[in-house]
Amino acid sequence: MDLVANLDRVRDRIAVAGGDPERVRILAVTKGHGVDAVRAALAAGLADIGEDRAQALVAKASELGDTGELGDEFPRWHFIGQLQRNKVRQIAHLVQLWQSVDRFQLGEEISKRAPGANVLVEVNLTDDPARGGTQPGLVPGLVDGLRDLGLHVGGLMAVGPVAPPDQVRGGFRQVRELADRLGLPERSMGMSDDLELAVQEGSTMVRVGTALFGRR
């Protein structure tokens, strides 16, 4: 794996799609990879690290912290997966951005364990209730509720649907328009397979795993 070369390719893809590689943040998604992937990302200048399982995040953070090898260059951990309330306590001291907040009850637990935390509201762009995220029509109310809890809602997050490109683009556009209406600057959308569409529709952060680290 040549992470530096892969990172350059991701930045080129962002630029070709019309985005500014210096302004569209790249979240290195290390889920399914070992702690060496985190080390490699940090060495390449990627400080934003995404995990989708509480146990894996704790294990990687513990291993990095125990070695003392990073000095002051610790990851900015993002939690990007569906999360049960009883797992919040395990990672509250580590997570700097909770990207997948999709219900008020989860926000309540986060506000209890990490008052004033930075969160994004996850939007479900499908009709599948098994997928994470809240339905678009419920987003404004959830944003208001999370703010009432004292949480800082910086923006919205979405996973593109498994669908033809026009439908994926339409979903990302819906997220961008919703974020604009709510005055939310952050739009975390786009992954390895669809980041171009997301960037063209106004993504400010892409969550990239495979394009950086290869298949799990």
Image (tube, rainbow, N blue to C red):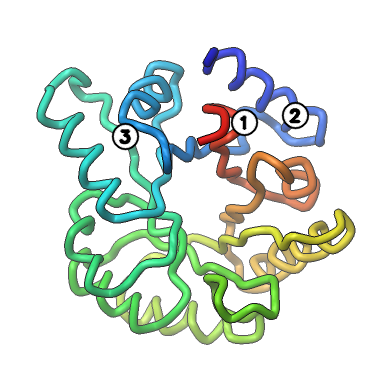
Give the residue number, with chain letter if any, for mark 1: 211
Q: Are marks 1 and 2 in contact (CB under 8 Å)?
A: yes
- Residue 61 drawn at (x, y percent): 22, 38
Q: Amino acid at mark 2?
A: Arg
The residue at the point 31 percent across, 30 percent down is: 35
- Label located before the other in sequence (1 or 2): 2
- Residue 207 drawn at (x, y percent): 56, 44
Q: Left or right of 102: which side holds 162?
A: right
The residue at the point 43 percent across, 66 percent down is: 82
Give the residue number, with chain letter if any, for mark 2: 13
Q: Amino acid at mark 1?
A: Ala
With respect to residue 147, does 12 lie above or below? above
With respect to residue 170, does 208 lie above or below? above
- Spatial CA distance of label 1 from label 2 is 11 Å
Q: What is the quadrant of residue 126 in the picture? A: bottom right
- Label located before the other in sequence (3 or 1): 3
Q: What is the quadrant of residue 13 in the picture? A: top right
Nearer to me, 91 or 175: 91
Disc 1 secondary structure class: helix
Q: Nearer the viewer, mark 1 or mark 2?
A: 1
Question: How busy is the neighbourhood of tag 2: few (under 14 within 10 Å), some, or many (20 plus)?
Answer: some
- Spatial CA distance of label 2 from label 3 is 24 Å
Q: Left or right of 83: which side holds 90?
A: left
Q: Left or right of 11: which side holds 58?
A: left
Which residue extends farthest right? Answer: 166
Give the residue number, with chain letter if any, for mark 3: 75
The residue at the point 38 percent across, 23 percent down is: 42
Nearer to me, 115 or 121: 121
Question: How busy is the neighbourhood of tag 1: few (under 14 within 10 Å), some, or many (20 plus)?
Answer: some
With respect to residue 89, does 215 lie above or below? above
Disc 2 secondary structure class: helix
Label annotation for residue 194: none
